[in-house]
Amino acid sequence: MNLPPSIEHAIRQQKKACNQTLNGYMYHLAPMHEKITKLRSIMPNGVDIFYAMKANPHLSFLKAAHDAGVAGIEIASLGEAKRAVAAGFFPNALIYTGPGKTPEELRWSVDHNIQTVHLESLTEAYRLEAIAAAAGVQQDVLLRINTNFDIHEAQTTFSGGSRKFGVDEEQLHTVLPALLTLPHLNFRGLHVYAASGVLNVDDLLKNCALVFSLTQEIERSYPNIHCDIIDFGGGFGIDYLEHGADFDPELWAKGLQALIVEYGFQGRHFVLELGRYLAADSGFFCTEIIDIKESRGKKQVVCAGGINHFRRPAALNINHPMSIVRLGIEKLFNAQISIHDEAVYFGGPLCTGADKLANNVHIEAADIGDIAVFGLAGAYGLSMSNIEFLSHKRADEWVISS
Ligand SMILES: Cc1ncc(COP(=O)(O)O)c(C=O)c1O
């Protein structure tokens, strides 16, 4: 990976300033800001971009999303809701998706008048109805549907097959009529989140077309229903393997515009809840090399941080783009092992074989005391890691202005 000079400079400065073992995330929010600004300028009328803060709940990401003018935040817990509000979002800029919302979380949502609750089941609908009725208010809701189509190529799929997400498409004819009888829930439309990490624009557009067809079918079957909001969830992918296969948002925007015209869906609202695409390139995981060992013909590099700080590579069994910041630390002993132009293995300090940061990755040169830097770590980095495992110090988070 070509490490931006400003990031390398910041890492060196950080090491100098702390004079301790370096282990943390370096964030610079300019890429996120630029992406949001660009997306807002190319999307068809009616498309609202929300930041899915599960990708990175750090205040700097929320503030960048706010400053760049996102429509709001997609939340998946009360903890996220409170952080978003602390970052400056009004509660009515929050949309709430995710299975297993507790009564307390639903009550907070109703009491704070959040924009929409995305129902994941009939149980949730009845629970929310009782809460809204007790509060004497009406709550706008979307119904999340587990369609019987999916995107096979995606990194992670969220629809198709048996799922804990949403309501099976086949059950719509029992669930929808029941939902429509609940007087304190105001049905506004559908939520269909197909998959995460999709690089192929056509796949995502095919999904949009199927969602539009489903919408038409529902509106034909229930003439008193109008789905004025259609939420596609997240899914824009990131080219972690650097194959030159970047997701092309302009192509997606043009394709969606064509579908809107084809289906006569002008005037409706379309929601994108993007996490990975917005946040990934605004973060670098930086961890000091503590040891380098030779084991049965392979070089094992042991870093200060492992899956307790950066679990994503192990969870998905991929190598993130990497770079080494050379610090020129004096050797501890003459026979100390170095790395020269070879493929090596990176792991952390945890007592599990699963603690892997990179496998068989080519490194030009590295020594103990250098900093291993993993790129595209702004999304699902610290927030997806096993933070408590072995009670190591939490990874630091530094924000640089760029
Ligand atoms: C409901 C929902 N919306 C949005 C997202 C964000 O997805 P992505 O990071 O792929 O954009 C997720 C991720 O799991 C999700 O579960």
Image (cartoon, rainbow, N blue to C red):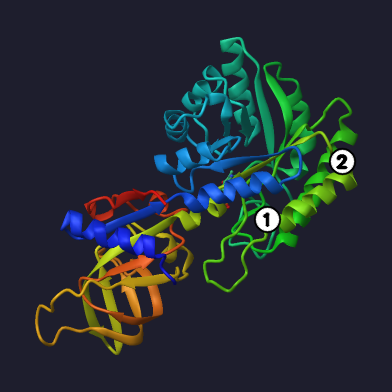
The amino acid pointed to by label 1 is: Pro
Q: Residues within 10 Å of mark 2 (few under 14, many from 20)?
A: few
Q: Is residue 226 left or right of residue 183?
A: right
Residue marked by disc 2: 217
Which circle marks residue 249 in the picture?
1
- Of residue 160 and residue 85, the one placed in the foreground of this image is 85
Q: Position of residue 21 (x, y in %)?
A: 19, 60
- Across and down, in percent, residue 50 comes to 59, 40
Give the numbered dot on residue 83: none
Left or right: residue 343 compared with residue 338:
right
Report whether 259 appears left or right of 13. Answer: right
Mark 1 crowdedness (10 Å alpha carbons): few <14, some 14-19, many ≥20? some
Tell me the residue at 47%/53% (across/down): 379
- The quarter holding residue 268 reads top right
User: Does 182 appear above or below 176?
Assistant: above
- Secondary structure of residue under mark 1: helix
Q: Quadrant of the N terminus?
A: bottom left
Residue type, label 2: Glu
